Amino acid sequence: MTPLKEGDKAPFFKGVNQNGKEISLDDFKGKKIVLYFYPKDNTSGCTAEACSLNEGYEEFMRLGYEIVGVSPDSIASHQKFIAKYNLAFNLIADTEKSILEAYGVWAEKSMYGRKYMGVLRTTFVIDETGTIVKVITKVNTKDAAGQLIKALSNHF
């Protein structure tokens, strides 16, 4: 699959959040969304990223952006993760990996010479028309919110 890039139409997605409620791209028509993909709840990098975005959540809302995280974790895992860190945004449980695959972030990775399938940590910013306006592939997990706000400064 060709990687998605700025200017591409965001692939349609539909999944369930931490409360079992269905969320789809259609829910964000006319709105801006930060759709971020991460490997696993409660791991150091993913926790740092989620907490950074949570700290910047009010600023993102003020700027008109909704934040939605996606990982292959279960609804129960997302519920615990949100409760533990008091996260203010939705997390989609993509256990079937259909959204991950549609966005090209479920791919072969390598660690210590071992190859395996996993999530490529990536953030997509989608505008009101459903167009991808920013793709961040080298996410600074400790300052994800600052990195994103800086990257979006020309889109405000």
Image: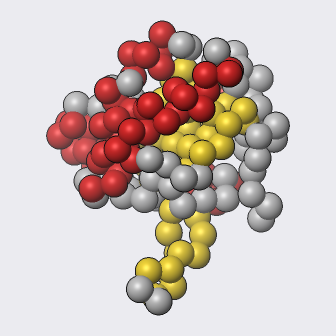
Residue 147 left/right relative to 83: right
Identify which residue, 19 or 83, lies in the foreground: 83
Q: How many marks?
A: 0
Residue at 43 percent of width and 32 percent of height: 145
In the rendered image, the vertical position of residue 79 relative to residue 122, given as above or below: above
Identify which residue, 114 or 145, lies in the foreground: 145
In the rendered image, the vertical position of residue 42 relative to residue 28, given as above or below: below
Residue at 54 percent of width and 61 percent of height: 120
Whether residue 20 is visible to the viewer of this picture, yes or no, is no
As drawn, the residue found furthest toward the top would be 62
Identify which residue, 129 or 44, lies in the foreground: 44
Residue at 55 percent of width and 38 percent of height: 35
Residue 12 left/right relative to 109: right
- Residue 115, how many percent across, how many down? 51, 85
Identify which residue, 37 or 142, lies in the foreground: 142
- Determine the image quadrant of residue 65: top right
Quadrant housing the C terminus = top right
Whether residue 51 is visible to the viewer of this picture, yes or no, is yes
- Determine the image quadrant of residue 24: top right
Quadrant housing the N terminus = bottom right
In the rendered image, the vertical position of residue 2 relative to residue 48, given as above or below: below
Residue at 67 percent of width and 31 percent of height: 126
- Residue 127, how many percent across, how many down? 70, 25
- Residue 23, how many percent across, how many down? 53, 33
